[in-house]
Image (spheres, grey):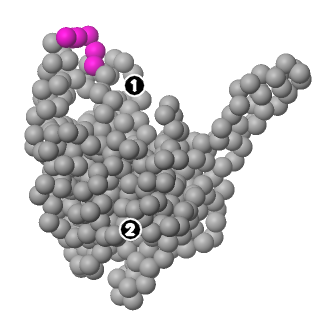
Amino acid sequence: MKQGNGQNFLKDLNLQKQSTESELEFVVFGRGYGECILIKYDACEYMVVDSFINPETKNPIVVDYLNPLNVSTKCIKKIVITHWHGDHIAGISDIIKRSSDDVKIIINPIVNNKKFFEFISLSKEQKQESTKEFVNVLDYIERSNSQNIFLASNNRPIFGKNDIEIKTLSPQDCEIWDYIYDLNTRLLNNGVGYDIPDNNELSIVLLLKYQGNGILLGSDLENKKNPNTSWNGIIKDYSDIKANIFKIPHHGSLNAHNDDVWKLMLEPFPISILTTFNKGKKLPTDEDIQRILSLSKKLYIVGQTSKRNKDIERLAKKTIADASITVIPRLIGLVRYRFDLISRQSKFETFGEVVKYMN
């Protein structure tokens, strides 16, 4: 079975053009099952938010992006693990190894709880890929004596310098308690193994501010009815800048939409960016796109998965026994935004599998 090439855009000379020392850079990568964000917030200082693997090179996508720019991975000074689902954490331990010796790991406070460590130990036996990756991260934390660990919480600054500020907006303290209680309950019912819950309750949301502008990174945070948790918990105490760029949460799914986020945390008609999800339920749906576009000036949809018609494949094999079927891999795309802090000039660029909608 032949394998097609879907990542040739990484060789694009325009993509390989370095940012200037005075430029802030914000890049969103997607591949249909995987999301990663890269932020250059200071000269040779980068922050990586989540990760996925390039299926052609087996490298974390940020490595394949930085190499042609002649930017050392040692310039990665901060790594944010928003949550530990497979489409957000793949390759993150590799990035840690390649990054600066004093890299800061921004992670959920749940890792500070002994009960959580017990459950991670139990889940090792299940050999889940996302759990294995997270265990590698925990091993790094133990080896570093937690000196490089930063625990995220509501309204906690990560970086501040030269009119640039980055802060975490979640999780809330009550969400940590609820999650720990859930772990205890599960252990009582089943002491053999543990599967990390399939939810996004503890996703880390980020706010990047620069010269009166803002970028809101929604992670995969979903809505809950509790007024003190999830997006409601963030909005409840929010009194910061209204962002003009929005990384849409949870691939545009309706369960992550909150009207008050658009009203209170965003400028009217911001530029929206989302990554696709093509495993199981496909996101975004046509309805999701229409809803988000109605609220946005522009909408970038990053990453796609080719669709294979299995009936056609079976028919081809039946008709021609040695028929060759070409499978195009999940295509990677990226949206890159650069803002010059001196001239205040900005530019959006797209590479690879990206669809742009205009309102």
Q: Earlier in the sequence, mark 1 or mark 2?
A: 1
Mark drawn on residue 4: none
Question: Looking at the picture, does residue 329 appear above or below residue 79?
Answer: above
Amino acid beneath label 2: Pro
Q: Are marks 1 and 2 in contact (CB under 8 Å)?
A: no
The quadrant holding residue 104 is bottom left
Q: Is residue 190 magenta?
A: yes
Q: Position of residue 126 (x, y in %)?
A: 36, 18
Quarter the N terminus occupies: top right
In this rendered view, identify the residue nearer to me: 108 or 211: 211
The mark closer to the camera, 1 or 2, is 2
Q: Which residue is mark 2?
A: 270
Give the residue drawn at x 28%, y 19%. 194
Question: Could you give the CA–CA distance between mark 1 and mark 2, rounded to whole angstroms?
Answer: 38 Å
Residue 143 visible, this angle: no
Picture residue at 35% right of the left edge, 82% below the top: 341
Taking depth in this image into account, of 323 and 161 the one nearest to the observer is: 323
Residue 224: % across, % down? 23, 39
Q: How many marks?
A: 2
**Magenta residue check for 330:** no
Point 44% across, 74% down: residue: 338
Q: Which residues are magenta?
A: 189-194
In the picture, measured across the screen, residue 231 lies left or right of residue 228, that is right
Which quadrant of the structure image shows residue 342?
bottom left
Identify which residue, 307 or 192, lies in the foreground: 307
* Callout 2: SS: strand
Mark 1 neighbour class, 10 Å CA radius: few under 14, some 14 to 19, many 20 or more:
some
Name the kind of residue labelled 1 in the image. Gln
Residue 35 at x, y = what percent? Answer: 44, 48
**Disc 1: which residue:** 128
Query: Mark 1 falls on what kind of element?
Result: loop
The residue sitting at 49% across, 52% down in the picture is 289
